[in-house]
Amino acid sequence: YTQALDHIKLIEQGYQLYTFDMVHSEREDNPNVSVIEGFTPELKKRYLRKEGETWYAYYDANPYPDDLNTQDNYIEGAKKRITVNAYERDPRARQACIVRHGTTCKGCGFNFEK
C-alpha cells in the first residue's frame, strides 16, 4: 500500500504509469485472500484519475470523453424530468435460474455466491 502511494506521487509529478495484467487465484488455506498466480508479460500504458478520495487506473486518458478538462464554471440549463420503467424480479424465478444454471457467470466465470 505504501509503495502504491509512492507511485501515485511520482505520477502526479509527471511520471508515466505502465501496468501488466495479473492472474489471481485463491489461497488454499484462506479462500478470502487473493494471491497472484501469474501475469501477462505485456506492459500497458494506464492513466490515473482521482474520484473523491479513490484513485482509478484507466487505459484511456479520459474515460469520460464528454467531460471537459477545464477550470471554467459552466451553468447548466433547465431541469428535465426523465421517467423510466423499473421491473421487480420474482424471487421464485431468480431461485429457479440459480437451481438450473448455478451462481457462476457463463461469460467470465465470476461466482456470485462466493
Image (cartoon, rainbow, N blue to C red):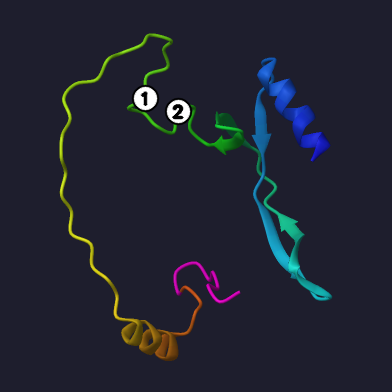
| Three-letter amino acid code of the residue under disc 1 | Asp
Residue at the farthest top position: 72
For mark 2, what is the residue? 62
Q: Badge 1: few (under 14), some or many (20 or more) residues near its Cα, within 10 Å?
A: few
Q: Badge 2: few (under 14), some or many (20 or more) residues near its Cα, within 10 Å?
A: some
Q: Do the residues labelled 2 and 1 touch (CB within 8 Å)?
A: yes
**Mark drawn on residue 77:** none
Region of the chain picked out in magenta, as a range: 106-114
Where residue 72 sits: x, y (%)?
38, 8
Where residue 9 sits: x, y (%)?
73, 23
What is the secondary structure assignment of the residue under circle 1? loop
Front position in the image: 37 or 40: 37
Quarter of the figure that contains the N terminus: top right
Point out the frontmost of discs 2 and 1. Answer: 1
Most common secondary structure along the magenta stretch: loop
| Three-letter amino acid code of the residue under disc 2 | Asn
Q: Residue at x 79, y 28 (%)?
A: 6
Front position in the image: 37 or 3: 3
What is the secondary structure assignment of the residue under circle 2? loop
In this rendering, is residue 23 above or below 1?
Answer: below
Q: In this view, does 10 lie to the left or right of 57?
A: right
Residue 110 is one of the magenta-drawn residues = yes
Q: Residue at x 55, y 29 (%)?
A: 49
In this rendering, is residue 98 above or below 61?
Answer: below
Front position in the image: 113 or 57: 113
